Amino acid sequence: MQVRVLAFVLAGGKGTRLYPLTKERAKPAVPFGGRYRIVDFVLSNLLNSGIHSIYVLIQFKSQSLLQHLRDGWEVSGLLKQHFIIPVPAQMRTPGEDWYRGTADAIYQNINLIEQADPHYVVIFGADHIYRMNIREMLEFHLHKRAQATVAAIPVAKDLAAEFGVIETTADGRITGFHEKNPNAPSMPGDPDQVYASMGNYIFSTSALLRELYEDAENPESSHDFGRDILPKMVKSGDVYAYNFQINHIPGDPPAQEPYWRDVGTIDAYYDASMDLRSPTPALNLYNRQWPLRTAGYFDAPAKLIHDDAGRSGEVYDSIVSGGSIVSGGVVRNSVLGRGVRVLAGAVVEDSVLFDNCVVGRGAHVRRAIIDKNFRVPDDARIGFDAAEDAALYHVTESGIVVVEGHRSTVDVATILL
């Protein structure tokens, strides 16, 4: 029997902890790795896993996300079950509400499930950086004859308040679910870690429909999978945890460890970005058997050139995206987006620059994230004087400077992205 799978990508969150990067865009549309967007990871994982029927549920500040989906993810195959379709809140609740929780987001689109009549429904978030062979998780779900399967990974115990923490038997059956509880139990034999839900689920369709209808009628529910649906299902059994650490990506070396990062804060986003510029990065973007897909930009190649004084453009342990030019400047341990210019005598260190930024002559940027279209003035210094940076920009407790970008009134494509 051919298994029918329908996927939902939850891409409607506000992403408030990533402010100001989410001031004008949804979190899944935040750039990452030079030329990608965060949403590209989950969509690539689904397509690479052979799952081609995908609804992307959008809500807050969705214009940049819609533009990116249009430019990079329009699927027009010959088969009707091949599609990636963005879906806004359908206002199907009695109060005609926006999505009230993750379960309500699916409930408001329950007609899509009933019309497609899949055997299984995959529900994944769009705000993490990771690669995952979802087909292996689906096979685990089938083997266990589970009603629901939750992808899980060990994290530090002091992060328990940020995750749904699960307890399991030796064979993976979930016996307890603790949603964002700082006192959640640690893993057996490891008091420093908890077993955390990744927010990625597979449901058998009949069980999902039953639970969604019952949850919608419960006035006490917050209509969330982690707080309501899954704890209720755990009591009846047949809910399992899939250990993400055993997941294998085709084309990766056997010893390659699975990579997953929750980039919910500026510091976490910065650390994940810095992971990329390592000579042997933990996140492998160069595996051709498991490509990371994105919009098809028509950029010229990146270029390093001498400036008028004969100083050469130099780049060390960095990612430089298409259309960027380093002209007599120096870039170290950084990630440069598309169309970035680093001018004569400028230095960029340990930083992330989004598309179309310009670093002026003699300027020095250190430990900063600079949003798109910003021009660093000649001889400016960002990341050196904490008081001065705080007066002008957003600065995290760890000292990362976040510079808001500028909007061009000329380049419409840049405005939308």
Image (spheres, rainbow, N blue to C red):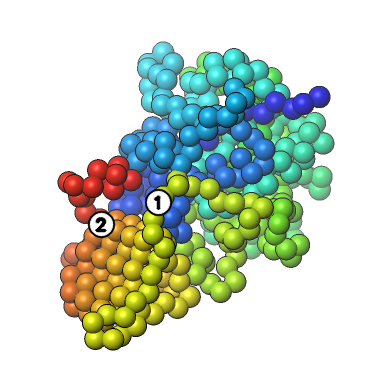
Number of residues whose C-alpha sits closer than 10 Å to that of mark 1, classed few (under 14), some (14–19) or many (20 or more): few
The circle on residue 298 is 1
Q: Residue drawn 67% across and 52% down?
A: 289
Q: Distance between the residues labelled 2 and 1?
A: 18 Å
Q: Which of 147 and 283 is in front in this view?
A: 283
**Residue 260: x and y, percent?**
58, 55
Q: Which of marks 2 and 1 is nearer the N terminus?
A: 1
Quarter where residue 149 is shown: top right
Image-based side of 146 in relation to 33, left or right = right
Quarter where residue 307 is shown: bottom left
Element class at badge 2: loop
Q: Which of 342 and 168 is in front in this view?
A: 342
**Residue 369: x and y, percent?**
34, 63
The circle on residue 71 is none
Quadrant containing the C terminus is: top left
Q: In this rendering, is residue 64 above or below 193?
A: above
**Residue 37: x and y, percent?**
44, 49
Quarter where residue 266 is shown: bottom left
Q: Nearer the viewer, residue 91 or 319?
A: 319
Q: What residue type is labelled 1?
A: Phe
The residue at which mark 2 appears reads as 373
Q: Which amino acid does label 2 sit on?
A: Asn
**Residue 353: x and y, percent?**
34, 63
Which is more foreground, mark 2 or mark 1? 1
Image-based side of 385 in relation to 99, left or right = left
Quadrant containing the N terminus is: top right
